[in-house]
Image (tube, rainbow, N blue to C red):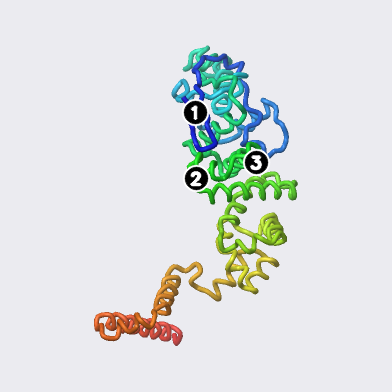
Amino acid sequence: MVKAKTKDIKIDFETEVKEIDISKLRLDLDNVRFQHLRKLLTDKEMENLLWGEKSTKDLYNQIKLAKGLYEEPIVDSNFVVLEGNRRLVCLRRLKQEIDGGKISEIKKGIFDKIKCRVIPEHISELDKELLLATLHVKGKKEWPAFNKAKQIHTLYTNYDISYQNLSKYLGMGKVTVIRMVEAYKKTQEYGLKYSEEKNWHKRYTYFDEFYRRQDLKEFREIKKNVDKFSAWVHENKFTNHRDVRLLRQVLDDEDARNALEIYNFEKALKILEQKNPGLNDKDFKQIQKTIKVVNSFSRKALIGIVNDTSKIAVIQKLKKEIDSFLKDIKSLEKR
């Protein structure tokens, strides 16, 4: 039984386990993992792409060793595999090798028919999409981030499901759902603009980080800034998506921003580090935190220290340690 309920989302149907001839099973040509290619693949093309993935070969070895599947694929009434496409590719390959005599330790015919969970013919396309979201967005078999975002975007855009209800159904924060939809849309726009990029969909992590950052909210509200960010991504200005976490600091420093626009983020970061050694140095980061603590003391707090000898002793010890630290630095300078 597959059940999921929110205020406006309700699916309730049973899957029936059946033995199906492997020759009848077809790969899902709408597989979300290959929609970034923007063309309809043939069954054979998709099989070759799936077989080219390391994870598929690992799965092949697991199935071969176990001489069977641990979990049945999910198929629709037309024998299209909605969940378990890699398993089908592995089984096809194993059957071919067994029948051809390349594998002798597994008897012939063992993979001629396999058990599948078949969903009813009457269920809607929305039910199918919700099922995939259940399995791959909020379930244990998580898709890559771009694919999850696409599935959420499909449910939001094509089926008019609110952010609030998607949040409830997927068990995710509403802010996260909104961010993923927005980041997916911008990644799609990026892919159309820079169509020469073969792996444009892998840029999703940059846009996800870009829309995650609250300190970039005002920057994002201006369209030309978003376009500029897309151009920086395309020009490989960033080393990886984690650089975006420090983008606000780069934008706030004229020298660093110029370095980003002329060179790259790495150059910009070096300029910031020269001005702010605590940016990437853990020890100086702690020193800067200490300075902030000292600066944040209110007059009321200072009055509370005046007659507390133990607190004054701590502050005096801090001064003594700093004086000694500076003395050591001066000594090294002379050498």
In the image, residue 279 lies at what x, y percent?
A: 51, 69
Residue that protrudes farthest toward the front in the picture: 7
Residue occupying the point 71% across, 59% down: 223
Between the C-alphas of marks 2 and 3, the distance is 18 Å
Instruction: Assess whether mark 3 and mark 2 are in contact (beta carbons under 8 angstroms).
Output: no
Amino acid tagged 1: Asn
Q: Categorize mark 3 by other alpha carbons within 10 Å: few (<14), some (14-19), many (20+).
A: few
- Front one among 130 and 68: 130
Q: Quadrant of residue 88?
A: top right
**Viewer-proximal residue among 94 and 117:** 117
Q: Is residue 274 above or below residue 43?
A: below
Q: List the residue tagged with mark 3.
A: 157
Q: Please tell me whether mark 2 sits on a helix, a strand or a loop.
A: loop
| Identity, as a three-letter code, of the amino acid under mark 3 | Thr
Q: Which residue is drawn at the image coordinates 50% and 37% (left, top)?
A: 6
Residue 13 picture location, percent across and down: 51, 24
Q: CA distance from mark 3 to mark 1?
A: 39 Å
Tag 3 secondary structure: helix
The quarter of the picture where the C terminus appears is bottom left
Mark 2 is on which residue type?
A: Met
Q: CA distance from mark 1 to mark 2?
A: 35 Å
Tag in front: 1 or 2: 2
Instruction: Identify the mark nearer the N-term, 1 or 2.
Output: 1
Q: Which mark is residue 61?
A: 1
Residue positioned 50% across, 14% down in the render = 110
Q: Label 2 belongs to which residue?
A: 172
